[in-house]
Image (cartoon, rainbow, N blue to C red):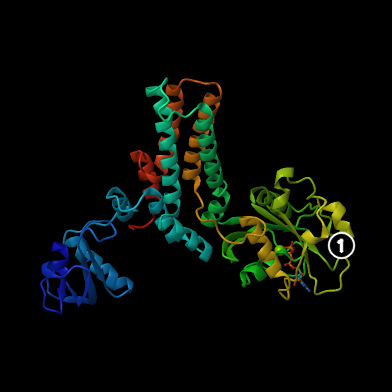
């Protein structure tokens, strides 16, 4: 407030100290040393506790050009303000109990969201979607702990005494809920970090054309000369709301040219790192002319569901016999193959649909209620392991004291997700990920 009164004069002729809370005032930013006006601006004072951080806040909205902002900032600093550390406002909001740790993380997700789906997921988390689920888990664990401890205190009496079977059943149910949350990790990772998708295939089948068609730009060079793309080309594209890092690669064939050989090595590396591989075939040429044998056996069994086979150039007369496929490509049925033309755009919608399905699961193309991140995953796995030991202990009729220890560990891990038990270094790690003051 003091700083604001030094550098801002309201046209409403109110001294800055007496500005009403949550009311926007029109005025000017002045250099207090010279009295010279720097900019016309709007200023607002928001008194605690109805603020983002639950502390008093003063904001100046000046004109957006870099010079006006820089000068206003400079005057504020000279008047006694300091720059916020990365994530400082959100950290204060967390420390003052306005939001929990999952909501603080959601602020970061929101700032870095590059697509609608990413934004939607961040909003859900920001409004407490994940926090509520975690709090419900904590409540269930606390209840189970209370029941377990009851049998420590009153081992012989049957005041509400729950036999081991009852404890096991409840414990099993909590594990199921943890399992459901854990299963959203992959989706959360993709919405936050983007999906890595590699386009691979023989030279000249239209890989670069496909990248260009998907991104709606001329990102990669396309020519009729086989071997055009030498290095991998990356572009982040919004595919049906999913942020996708598409990697166009050099066509794979036998080559003696050292440049091409290095390109091909990079193509294979991109394939290894990809979440989804798009294998492109040229429909206007015979299979023998685009030998994809490099591909078979390249990927491990577990990853086969992550491969989309595409026949490109369907606008031309077709020479690639579809029957070849069933045998060649992992017994994939013909229905699995997506037919497109990078030139006319035909079939690209089906491809988009297929990619979304791979992210959200078959028949489901919307995001989960709450999708967890790596920190949540590690904590949930810790809780799950403790619960597994608890259940095993119940089976062996271990003494309730030991069982309660496991439950306390699970509770600690789950509590850490919302920040009830998070140590300082974890907090610093989370907030330093913010690249701006927010
Ligand atoms: N008619 C038709 N031509 C296409 C289509 N897609 C690509 N082409 C043409 O095929 C040729 C090769 O296209 P590229 O996109 O450069 O192929 P590539 O797979 O990236 O080739 P390399 O980088 O050499 O491995 C170009 O002449 C394109 O115009 C298509 O759907 N229809
Ligand atoms: Mg290319």
User: Percent position (x, y) of residue 302?
Assistant: 71, 44
Task: For residue 33, say whether it is visible.
Answer: no
Q: Is residue 103 left or right of residue 274?
A: left
Name the secondary structure under disc 1: loop
User: Percent position (x, y) of residue 189?
Assistant: 54, 51
Task: For residue 193, say whether it is visible.
Answer: yes
* Residue 357, quarter of the rendered image: bottom right
Q: Is residue 43 left or right of residue 245?
A: left
Q: Quadrant of ligand 2?
A: bottom right
Tell me if residue 154 comes above or below residue 234 in the rendering: above
Task: Please give the count of numbered marks on the rendered protein.
Answer: 1
Q: Is residue 375 left or right of residue 90?
A: right
User: Percent position (x, y) of residue 176?
Assistant: 55, 41
Of 250 and 429, the residue lying toward us: 429
Crowding around mark 1 (Cα neighbors within 10 Å: few <14, some 14 to 19, many 20+) is some
Give the residue drawn at x 41%, y 50%.
102
Give the residue drawn at x 33%, y 54%.
90
Mark 1 vs ligand 1: CB under 8 Å? no
Q: Which residue is mark 1?
A: 322
Of 434 and 391, the residue lying toward us: 391
Of 260 and 273, the residue lying toward us: 273
User: Percent position (x, y) of residue 345?
Assistant: 71, 74
Give the residue furthest to the front.
158
Q: From the image, which quarter does the N terminus lie in?
A: bottom left
Tell me if residue 415 comes above or below residue 35 in the rendering: above
Of 85 and 153, the residue lying toward us: 153
Q: Is residue 248 left or right of residue 28?
A: right
Q: From the image, which quarter does the C terminus lie in?
A: bottom left
């Amino acid at each position: 407030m003091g700083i604001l009164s030094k550098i801002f004069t309201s046209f409403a002729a109110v001294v800055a100290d007496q500005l009403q809370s949550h009311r926007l005032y029109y005025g000017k930013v002045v250099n207090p040393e010279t009295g010279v006006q720097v900019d016309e601006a709007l200023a607002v004072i928001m008194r605690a506790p109805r603020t983002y951080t639950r502390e008093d806040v003063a904001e100046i909205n000046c004109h957006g050009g870099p010079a006006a902002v820089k000068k206003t900032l400079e005057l504020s600093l000279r008047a006694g303000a300091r720059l916020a550390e990365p994530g400082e406002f959100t950290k204060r909001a967390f420390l003052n109990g306005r939001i929990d740790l999952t909501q603080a993380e959601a602020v970061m997700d929101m700032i870095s969201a590059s697509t609608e789906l990413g934004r939607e997921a961040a909003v859900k988390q920001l409004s407490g979607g994940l926090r509520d689920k975690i709090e419900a888990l904590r409540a269930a664990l606390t209840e189970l702990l209370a029941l377990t401890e009851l049998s420590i205190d009153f081992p012989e009496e049957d005041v509400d005494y729950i036999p081991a079977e009852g404890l096991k059943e409840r414990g099993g149910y909590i594990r199921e809920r943890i399992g459901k949350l854990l299963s959203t990790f992959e989706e959360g990772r993709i919405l936050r970090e983007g999906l890595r998708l590699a386009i691979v295939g023989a030279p000249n089948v239209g890989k670069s054309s496909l990248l260009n068609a998907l991104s709606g730009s001329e990102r990669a060079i396309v020519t009729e000369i086989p071997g055009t793309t030498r290095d991998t080309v990356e572009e982040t594209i919004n595919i049906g709301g999913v942020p996708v890092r598409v990697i166009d690669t050099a066509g794979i064939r036998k080559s003696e040219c050292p440049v091409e050989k290095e390109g091909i090595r990079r193509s294979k590396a991109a394939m290894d790192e990809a979440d989804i591989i798009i294998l492109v075939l040229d429909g206007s040429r015979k299979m023998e002319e685009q030998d994809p044998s490099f591909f078979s056996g390249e990927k491990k069994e577990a990853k086969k569901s992550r491969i989309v086979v595409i026949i490109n150039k369907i606008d031309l007369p077709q020479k690639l016999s579809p029957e070849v496929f069933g045998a060649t490509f992992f017994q994939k049925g013909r229905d699995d193959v997506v037919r497109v033309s990078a030139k006319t755009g035909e079939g690209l919608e089906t491809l988009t649909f297929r990619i979304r399905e791979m992210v959200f699961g078959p028949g489901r193309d919307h995001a989960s209620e709450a999708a967890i991140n790596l920190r949540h995953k590690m904590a949930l796995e810790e809780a799950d392991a403790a619960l597994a030991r608890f259940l095993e202990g119940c089976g062996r009729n271990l003494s309730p004291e030991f069982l309660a220890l496991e439950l306390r560990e699970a509770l600690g891990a789950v509590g850490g997700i919302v920040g009830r038990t998070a140590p300082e270094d974890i907090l610093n790690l989370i907030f330093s990920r913010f690249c701006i003051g927010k």
